[in-house]
Amino acid sequence: MAKTYRAAIIGAGSARPGGQYWGMGHGHAQAYADHPRVDLVAIADIKPENAQALADRFGVAATFDSHQKMLKAVNPDIVSVCTYPATHCAIVCDVAKAGVKAIHSEKPMAPTWGEAKKMVATCEKHSVQLTFNHQRRFLEPFRIARDLAHDGTIGELRRLEATCGNLMDWGTHWFDMLCFFNSNTDIEWVIGQIDGREGRPVFGLPHEGQGLSQFKFVNGVRGMLVTGHDANLGADLRLLGTEGLIEVHNAFPHARVLTSARKGWKMIKTKEGLHGMEAVTRAIADAIACLESKQEPELAARRALRSTELIFATYESSRLRQRIDLPLRAKDSAFLTMLEEGVWSRRR
């Protein structure tokens, strides 16, 4: 008989409908409810009313005001961590040490590179499967773009470009997507610049007002992410090859192709856009399937580290004013350190 898993969520999100899916805890709860062999047994949140609201919505019996109490009381197999990034490292390490089988955490990984690596090392030490919710890998427009980039449609893939609001919160998705488009290939170096002025906090973390990251994969493909002020590139993501290019857009149609073989753009019809909570359901289903098969999940922590290293290496390049050859050695966030030092307030 197939095993039934006991799941729990840390970080319920808002008790009121609206906003960012009410908080991602609601998306994770729906994913567990959709899985035929998962029982969602507990919700933990430092605001009891939020935990109770999510529990009521999904018929969960147990709620707790701390993750420590929950771990002792219900002994879950799988835990989702849906709290703000600054709390991820402590919570993930606590959960890993409690003897769970798998952790599925929200992104971005952590405020510093050292914390990101610590989470992965702790889970490896305790034989816990760790995944991070770069769920857009499961959506149709991105998968179509990935496949077209490697089936000869645009010749040999040479360059990847993306634009978004910031390097950390949204940029973690786009860095991950550029890695996804290039078959999860390792990265050789990063050079970048950030402007700490005019940024705004997202989920408790400050962000740059403008940024630029350029990097080189070990297979020679180049990548670029432009963020913040005046960052429009004409497409959310662009894949350039020797014989054409692919663009991915938030607006419909979500994907289009231009090649030397035909005149004009070919619009790619997709049933899905660039967003959608169905991707979270697929991500959690994949994590559970891989827990059973012992294969590497699509959203494995090792892959999350690759895109996260790009973020912190871009910060470090701006701090040192030089190219950063990977692996990154600095353990802090150069951006947060420079903010604390008042770097941009001193510049005129």
Image (spheres, rainbow, N blue to C red):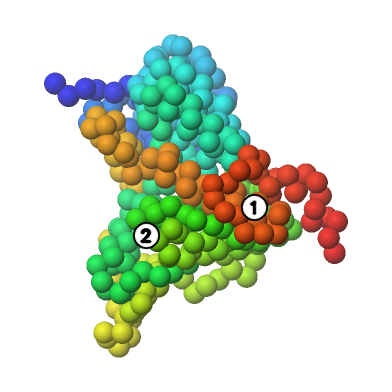
Residue 234 % position (x, y): 49, 74
Q: CA distance from mark 1 to mark 2?
A: 23 Å
Position of 49 relative to 324 (above/below): above
- The image's mark for residue 169 is none
Question: Nearest the camera: 196 or 17?
Answer: 196
**SS under mark 2:** helix
Is residue 289 something that shows in the picture? yes
Residue 130 % position (x, y): 41, 33
Quarter of the image with the N terminus is top left
Query: Residue most toward the bottom?
Result: 263
For residue 46, which quarter of the picture? top right
Q: Residue at x 64, y 43 (%)?
A: 330
Quarter of the image with the C terminus is bottom right
| Residue at mark 2 | 181
| Residue at mark 1 | 315
Q: Residue at x 81, y 49 (%)?
A: 342
**SS under mark 1:** helix
Question: Nearest the camera: 152 or 279?
Answer: 152
Q: Amino acid at mark 1?
A: Tyr
Q: Earlier in the sequence, mark 1 or mark 2?
A: 2
Question: Nearest the camera: 16 or 332?
Answer: 332
